[in-house]
Image (cartoon, rainbow, N blue to C red):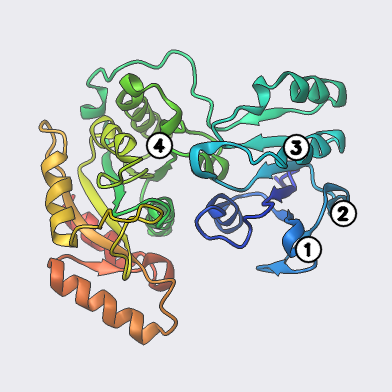
Amino acid sequence: MTSRRRILVLGEGFSHDPHYGKTMRGIIRYGPDPVVAILDSKRAGEEHEGIPIVATVADALVYEPTVAVVGVATQGGRFPSAWRELLKASIAAGLDVESGLHEFISDDPELAELARRRDVELRDLRKPPEGLNVPTGANLEVDAKIVLTVGSDCAIGKKTVAVELDLEARRRGLESVFVPTGQTGIAIAGWGIAVDAVVSDFLAGAAEQLVVEGARRGGSLLFVEGQGSLVHPMYSGVTLGLVHGSAPHAFVLCHRAGSTEIEGCPGHPIPPLGELVELHERIALPARRAKVAGIALNTAEIARDDDARDVIDAVAAETGLPTDDPVRFGAGLLLDALLARL
């Protein structure tokens, strides 16, 4: 069936930024629906991966979008002040609007009324479902092998690695499911819970609910999208709740090649990878002692493939673990390591 959704990505001020524009990049690379235009007035007239960049919603209408998707992940999940008019313009143009920020557009009286008058839908991907609670123990009874991606920092590819591993597993005919735990993953997969928006007491319960749902969807191998980092001074809490709630059998540790300090947090160093491996294995749920099965290295900032391979080989020698960049060189090596471990 041909999709009827045609996406206008709202990337105002951030479409150039791999960090704050990561939602845009995830939707373009992995989403099932076509992105027909990107809105960013600072780059109007340019293209991103062949997709035209426009200055206004009116300029985008020639590409016949049906939905405007907020393609940025701002610090704290709040809309920049200028975005209010952008959202109103999208609704006035008759577009449904999807947002993954913490500031819920469907709860805004003015935007909700405008959407009602234009008969369009406002969807908050980060809004938690009703009825969440603490874990019940069902996470340890799921009839599937669970893999969680964890990382040395935020926005380094934990979601991307989980998606790439799932795609490789399904290419091999395995019953694999990608389990979304954040707004971009939900936009890609069409289901999930943004665990960083859940009340802290219920975060592990939400993660449990997600792996149960992943198995219900037919997954005998579940790749859970990681969030935050255990060593991040701002976002470590979401990581721990996800670790204990999803109860993985194995971790894949993600790291950006060459990074030594938490981005945006001067004075907060990233420990050596060997220490991070030990930290995650020690922090795993005592009822299921997960091991790190491999290192997923983000080498995007290394220009030459040969140089990237040298860095990958050095990390493999340093940690004694299978290491690769699954985006650049494919996820086969890391999947082999996981299957051997599981």
- Residue type indicated by callout 2: Asp
Between circles 2 and 4, the one closer to the viewer is 2
Circle 4 is placed at which residue position? 218
Question: What residue is shown at x 86% (from left), y 26% (from top)?
Answer: 118
Judged from the image, the secondary structure of the residue bearing numbered disc 3 is helix
Q: What SS does tag 4 mark?
A: loop
Viewer-nearest of discs 4 and 3: 3
User: Depth check: 82 or 274 in front?
Assistant: 82
First-in-chain label (2 vs 3): 2
Residue beneath disc 1? 44
Q: In the rendered structure, which amino acid carries the disc numbered 4?
A: Gly
Query: Is 4 positioned to the left or the right of 32 in the image?
Result: right
Answer whether labels 3 and 1 touch (C-beta < 8 Å): no
Q: Give how far apart the Cα atoms at labels 4 and 1 are.
A: 43 Å
Residue 96 falls in image quadrant: top right
Query: Could you tell me residue 29's position as x and y percent?
Result: 57, 59
Q: CA distance from mark 2 to mark 3?
A: 15 Å
**155 w.r.t. 302: above or below:** above
Task: Report the disc number at residue 59.
Answer: 2
> What residue is shown with label 3?
87
